[in-house]
Every structure is written in C-alpha cells, then in structure tokens.
Amino acid sequence: MSSIINYLTKIRFGADALDDLAEELSLLGVARPLIVTDAGLTASGLVDRVQAAIGGKHPAPVYDETPANPTEIAIEAAVACYHEHGCDGIVALGGGSSIDLAKGVALLASHPAPLRQYAVIEGGAA
C-alpha cells in the first residue's frame, strides 16, 4: 500500500505507488504530463515503468536534466520542454530536487518569469 502526503500538491510514495498513477492523472484532468526526474532514474528503467503506468498512445515526455540543486535555468529549460510537448500536468519522479524543480515548472508554466518574483522575500507570497 502506498502512502500519501497532501500539502499544496499530492506526493504518493511506496512500492505500489504507480498502481494509482493513471487514475490520479485522470482525476486531475491531466492527459499529457511531463515527467520531471533525473538521468539516474531514467537510466535505471524507472521512467519507462512510469510511462507504462501513465499509458496513452505516446510515451509521456521526460525532462531528466534535474541538477542536484535546481536552478532557475533548469526550471526554464523544463518549462520549454513542457510547452514544446503540449503538456497539461507534471509528474515529479525522484527526490527533493526533482520535486522542487517540478514545483518551479508548475508555477512558470502558467505564470510569467522570473521565478524570484514569487519568493516571499520579494513580496511574492500573495
């Protein structure tokens, strides 16, 4: 049984977390997610398993250049990938870096850059 963390976004983890992925995406109305991950998880074959769990005619696009500490440049590159492939949602796969990068993509996919304007210290809390 997988576990869930709900806080602004939903994080599902555990051995069977992939079992519910297609249903979760459907509930959210996501038909073409971008998978945000790192090259290590792509090389491990896990991204292939996630794409299979998502299903569809074509594999979900992948951004796997997540650096250890995500930068605005990496986020902008992932946002470009998101728009290039006509994505309508995001699946973050991996640890904190992939999740943080995915959160930045989610914000900049529908809001203007630069990212720093949304930081609390820049007055972006509202």
Image (cartoon, rainbow, N blue to C red):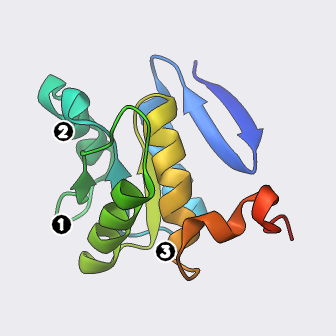
Q: Residue furthest right?
A: 126
Residue 22 visible in this rendered orientation of the protein: no
**Amino acid residing under circle 1:** Lys
Q: Position of residue 78 (x, y in %)?
A: 33, 61
Q: CA distance from mark 1 to mark 2?
A: 14 Å
Choose mark 3 or mark 1, whichever is in front. 3
Q: Can you identify the residue that label 2 sits on? A: 48
Q: Is residue 112 above or below residue 23?
A: below
Residue 31 visible in this rendered orientation of the protein: yes
Q: Can you identify the residue that label 1 sits on? A: 57
Q: Crowding near pointer 1: few (<14 within 10 Å), some, many (20+)?
A: few
**Amino acid residing under circle 3:** Ala
Q: Position of residue 126 (x, y in %)?
A: 87, 71
Q: Residue furthest left?
A: 43
Q: Horizontally, is 6 left or right of 61 in the view?
A: right
The quadrant holding residue 88 is: bottom left
Q: Horizontally, is 69 left or right of 84 in the view?
A: right
Q: Is residue 76 above or below residue 62?
A: below
Q: Crowding near pointer 2: few (<14 within 10 Å), some, many (20+)?
A: some
Choose mark 2 or mark 3, whichever is in front. 3
Q: CA distance from mark 2 to mark 3?
A: 24 Å
Do the residues bearing badges 1 and 2 touch, measured as CB atoms within 8 Å?
Answer: no
Q: Can you identify the residue that label 3 sits on? A: 109
Query: Quick one: label 2 or label 3, which is nearer the N terminus?
Result: 2
Q: Residue at x 51, y 41 (%)?
A: 99
Element at label 1: loop
In front of the other: 42 or 22 = 42
Q: Residue furthest front?
A: 122
Q: Position of residue 68 (x, y in %)?
A: 37, 31
Q: Horizontally, is 11 left or right of 31 in the view?
A: right
**Amino acid residing under circle 2:** Asp
